[in-house]
Image: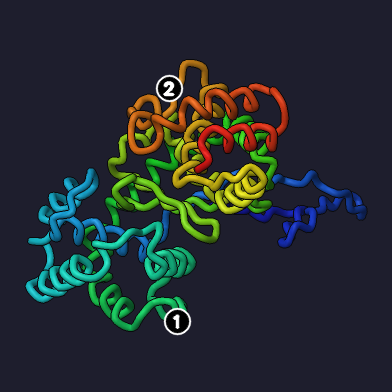
Amino acid sequence: MSHFRVTVGVVLMAMGVAASVVSGGQSTPAPRVPPPLVRFSVDDLWLDLHHFLYVLGRAQAGLADALGTIAPHEQDAMLPTLSPVEQTRWRDAVSLYAQKFSRRDLVSDRELVAMTGALAAIGGAATLDGAGPTLSPEVVATLERVAPAYRRAWWPAHRHANEQWVAETKPLVDQHGQQVLTFITHAYQLPWPAAGYPVHVCAYTNWAGAYSTDGPLLVVSSVDAGADHGPAALETVFHEATHQWDDAIALRLAELGQPIGKKVPDGLTHAMIWMTAGEAVRRAIPGYVPIAEAGGLWARGANPRYRPALEATWLPYLNGKGTRDDALLALMKLVGR
C-alpha cells in the first residue's frame, strides 16, 4: 500500500496527472513516479478472517493440508482468552465453513471467487456494510458475529505476519521485479496492469499457500507456505500474476491447434507458467532453483509429459529463438490432444 506525503511546494494529483513544483511563481513539471509493479495490501481484516475460517473448516472436516496443520494450534491457543459466548460463536462459524465452504475450491468455485473479491475490496472497514450484494446475508452475519473476537485474539499476530512477509518480499520485487516482469511480458507478449498487480497478503490462504482469481487478484499466505518465503516468494508473486493471461494464451493455443486437429490439453498453460516464471527468477537471481524443480512438481500429474515438450519448444523461445506463435504451434504439435 503506497502512502504519499504532501509537502509545501508539491501538489500530488490523482489519475495520472503529474505533480508540479512551484518555484519563483513558475510551475515546472516534476518527474512522474511510475506505479509499483505489484501493490501489496496487509490490512484486509475481513479477507484474513475468511481465510482463517476456511482453513480451520478444512481441518475440522478432515481435509488436511499444510496450513491446516498450523491453524488449529493457533486457534486453540487463543480460544481460552474469549468469553464463553464468543467461543460458541467462533466454533459455530468454523462449523459453518466446514460444512459449507471449506470443502470447495477457492480458485474454481464461483461463489468463493466472488466472496474473495468482495472481501478484498472492502479491506479493513469497520463493518461489511459496503460489501454489496455479492456476500450472502448468512456470510455477512457470520463474519460480523465473530469479527470482534478475531480482532482481539488473532488479528494482531496475523497482521504482523503479513507485514513481515511484505518486508521480506518487497525488497526482492524492488531489486529484481523489473527484470522478471520484462522477461515474462516479452515471453507472453501481453500487457501488465498499468496500476500494478494487486497482492493481498493474508495469514492463511488455501492448500497451495497462494492463489489468483478474477480481477486480477492474488492472495498469498504469510504464515507457512514453504515456497512463499525468500526468493521463491518473488517467483510466486509473478507466477500467480501470470495466470491473468491464461485465457488469452489458451485461446491462441486453440487457434493454432485447430488447423492441425489439436486441442489444448488440461494443465498446459499452468505448466508454461511454471517454466516461464521459474526461468525469469533464475535469470534474475543466479543460482536460484525454481519452485517446480525444488519441489519435484515436474514429476507430478501431466507435468512429466509437458516438461520435455516445453524444453524442446518453449524454452528455446525464452532463450531468444523464434516467435511466440512459432513456439506455441510447436508445443501444440507435441502435446495437443
In this rendering, does residue 230 appear at all? no
The quadrant in which residue 128 appears is: bottom left
Residue picked out by circle 2: 289
The label on residue 258 is none
Q: What colour-coding does the image apply?
A: rainbow
Crowd around label 2: few <14 · some 14–19 · many ≥20 (10 Å): some
User: x and y percent of residue 192 in the render?
Assistant: 65, 47
**Disc 2 marks which amino acid?**
Val
User: x and y percent of residue 120 in the render?
Assistant: 45, 63
Residue at the farthest top position: 287
- Considering the numbered disc 1 on the image, is that residue within a helix, a strand or a loop? loop
Q: In this image, 89 relative to 100: left or right? A: left
Residue in front for this viewpoint, 299 or 215: 299
Q: In this image, 273 relative to 143: left or right? A: right
Which tag, 2 or 1, sits closer to the chain's start? 1
In this rendering, does residue 164 appear at all? yes
**Disc 1 marks which amino acid?**
Pro
Residue at the location (38% across, 64% down)? 109
Residue at the location (45% across, 47% down)? 266
